[in-house]
Each structure stands twice: as structure tokens, then as C-alpha cells.
Amino acid sequence: MPKKEKTMEDTPLRPFVLGIETSCDETAAAIVSADKKILAHKILSQIDEHSEYGGVVPEIAARQHISNLDHLIKSVLSDGKMDFKDLDAVAATTGPGLVGGLMVGVMTAKAAARAAGKPFVAVNHLEGHALTARLTEDIPFPYLLLLVSGGHCQLLAVYGVSRYERLGTTIDDAVGEAYDKTAKLLGLGYPGGPAVEKEALIGDEDRFPFPKPLLNKPGCDFSFSGLKTAVRRTAEACAKERGALYPDDRADICASFQKTIALCLLNRVSRAMVLFREKAGTGTLPLVVAGGVAANKYLRAALKEAAEKEGFSFHAPPLALCTDNGAMVAWAGLERFRHDPSIDDFDVSPRARWPLDESATPLVGKGKKGAKA
Ligand code: KG4
Ligand code: ZN
């Protein structure tokens, strides 16, 4: 077969940024280019290490990052046929997240950047999720963002790089957390989201009328802790009635839970779309969903329908880029570097809490450290 000739289009455009992600239970690294090419990427999941505990154990996570990160970076550079000197910047998630893991990623990134004479870019993990849709599609600012992950549930107006206005947030649990806790109490393992989604496919979503906290209430905030309690009570009642929790009851609980989550999200997103339209004007505005829970196909379909009804275009990253990954960090680093080419965050230290809208009042985990969610 004749060799395909290399065209200008194949040559990636600078800047090239390496991104490192270690904020939770994924060790990930990737290199992206200005023309949105993912030149190399790798993720090492720690699911096996944490699954027997039903959640992430911070100490185990940090140790795993230490053991894996160097090899992972080497292999990403080798896949991209690059050396540190070929990069324009090194970015790492600097918060929010588990401090042990953040320290591993940030120290490694700073050391590599300093040794190669490149700038270090401190990336907010949430900004990584928030900007992913701009890596995979050409979405201009401003847009409305629903950020749904294991630690966060927020509605944000995104005006530009590092320019966010929080329109709503959870007053208790994050959506991913609700999925994980539901999965744990139904014996479905960790991480809970994909397991609950799979069970829900075979269940009756109308069987259990779970409470819908904050539905139709003013504002755009969320609440999921009451739902979690209702799921527990229902599972206990089913088990009591039949002597054990049977698979059909379990599937019906998952389906009813997921439908309730969708209704709550849609209600809040619809309100946020009206609010955002007042701020951002007429015409088709984008609604972007991001974060691990955005990988849920049922929720994606429901959000798409709601967005289109309100005259919004709907955008969700490909499933693999919804959950934590290195490309989102590299891309957010690239956007920040491009926005300010003199950036060098060498003095920035890891932060367990780091809200995107620093002016918004924390509703969860108030105090010196700032907002948890
Ligand atoms: O963004 P992410 O990978 O990590 C955080 O920044 O938190 O999100 C992880 C969360 C977990 O709670 C996981 O259960 C949830 O995303 N998740 C899902 C699905 N895939 C992952 N939730 C619902 N449906 C899914 N398919
Ligand atoms: Zn995340």
C-alpha cells in the first residue's frame, strides 16, 4: 500500500502542554496541542485498590500515585514522541482534591517543569472538567455549565478562562456521591455510577416515588441527601418483606433513583437556563454538561431534550473524557497558558478546596478552607 503523505493538517499546532491528574483515584497524564489534538494520553485507575473499602482511601491513593506517576509520564512522552524540552508548559491539577495525591502530581510537575525550563501551570480540577467541551468541540464563551461529579454538583455561567459565576450548587451531597452511596448500600460496588446506570436499564423507574428535594423551589441549588435516605429505607423495606433484597427490587430502586435524579437536575437546569439567558442574551446558547456523572447516558438524553426545548444547544464530552483524565488537565493548562503566556504558577501550592467562583458563598463545608462542593 502506498504510504499516506503527511499534510500540514497532521502537524499539531503549538503550544504543546503536558497535563497531570492525581486529585483522586486516577493517575493520568496527557499531552494536547492548540489545535485540540490529544497527542498522547494514559490513565491508571485504582478501582481495584479501593473497591474493597467501598470508596477512595486517601492514603492508598497517594501511595499509588507515587508508584505510578513517573512511569506514566515517561510512557506518555514516549507515545507522543517527545521529551520535556519539546513541551511549552507542564500543568497539574493543584486542587480541589485529596491533598496527598495533589502533592504528588504538583511536585512532580514542578520538578519536571523547572528542570526543563518550562512554566508550571496550576490547574483547578473543576476548570479541567469545565473546559473539556472546548477541547472536543468548538464552543465559544459564554456557556451554561452543569458540573456533576463525585465531589461536585454545580451550575455555572462560564464567561471565559478562569471567569465563572456560580448560579447554583448542592447544599449537601454531590450527584456522583449519591450514586456511589446508593450503589454501596445496594451492594453494587465502587464506583457506583456505572453500576447503578446498568441496573436501572432493567428496572421499573416508576415503581418507587422517591422524594425530590428542592423541586420547584426558588434558585438553582440542589439537594440529594434526603433521596439517599429514602433509597436506604426502601431497600430495607424490600429486604424485610422478602427476606433479602432481590435483584428485581434492586433494579427497580436503581431505575426509580435515576429517574428522580434526572427530574431534580432538569428542574434546576431549566431554571438556570432562564437565568443564564437573562445574562447572556438571545439566540442559541450552549448548555454543557461535564464531570464523571455526565457519562450517564440516561441523564445525557434527558438534558439534551430539556436544552433543546429551551433553545439551547447541548454539548457533552465523549464518555471517556467525562470521568477524570489527563487531557482535561492538559487542555485547561493550555487554555490558561494561551490566555497568559507569561504564566508560571511555581508559587501555587495544592489546595484541598478551590471553588471556581471564589466570590460565591460556600454552602457545604464552610470555614477557613472554603467550600467543599
Ligand atoms: O469527575 P469524576 O471522575 O471524579 C470527580 O472529580 O469526582 O467523577 C466520578 C463520579 C463518581 O461518583 C462516579 O460514580 C460518577 O462520577 N459516575 C457516574 C457514571 N460514571 C461515573 N455516575 C452516573 N452514571 C455514570 N455512568
Ligand atoms: Zn473530576
Image (cartoon, rainbow, N blue to C red):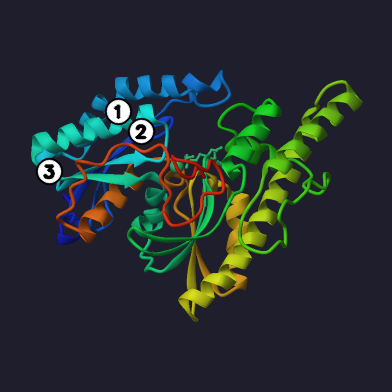
Where residue 294 appears, as percent x and y from the top left, is 53, 49
Q: Nearer the viewer, residue 296 or 233?
A: 233
Where residue 13 appears, as percent x and y from the top left, is 17, 57
Q: Is mark 3 within 8 Å of ligand 2?
A: no
Please name the residue that numbered disc 1 is placed on: 104
Cα distance between the residues tagged 2 and 3: 20 Å
Looking at the rendered structure, the number of numbered marks drawn on it comes to 3
Quarter location, residue 92? top left
Q: Nearer the viewer, residue 7 or 116?
A: 116
Q: Is mark 2 within 8 Å of ligand 2?
A: no
Q: Earlier in the sequence, mark 1 or mark 3?
A: 1
Q: Nearer the viewer, residue 176 or 193?
A: 176
Q: Earlier in the sequence, mark 2 or mark 1?
A: 2
Please name the residue that numbered disc 2 is placed on: 22
Please name the residue that numbered disc 3 is placed on: 118
Q: State whether residue 74 is above or below residue 95.
A: above
Q: Earlier in the sequence, mark 2 or mark 3?
A: 2
Report whether 7 appears left or right of 65.
Answer: left
Amino acid type, callout 1: Val
Quarter location, residue 100? top left
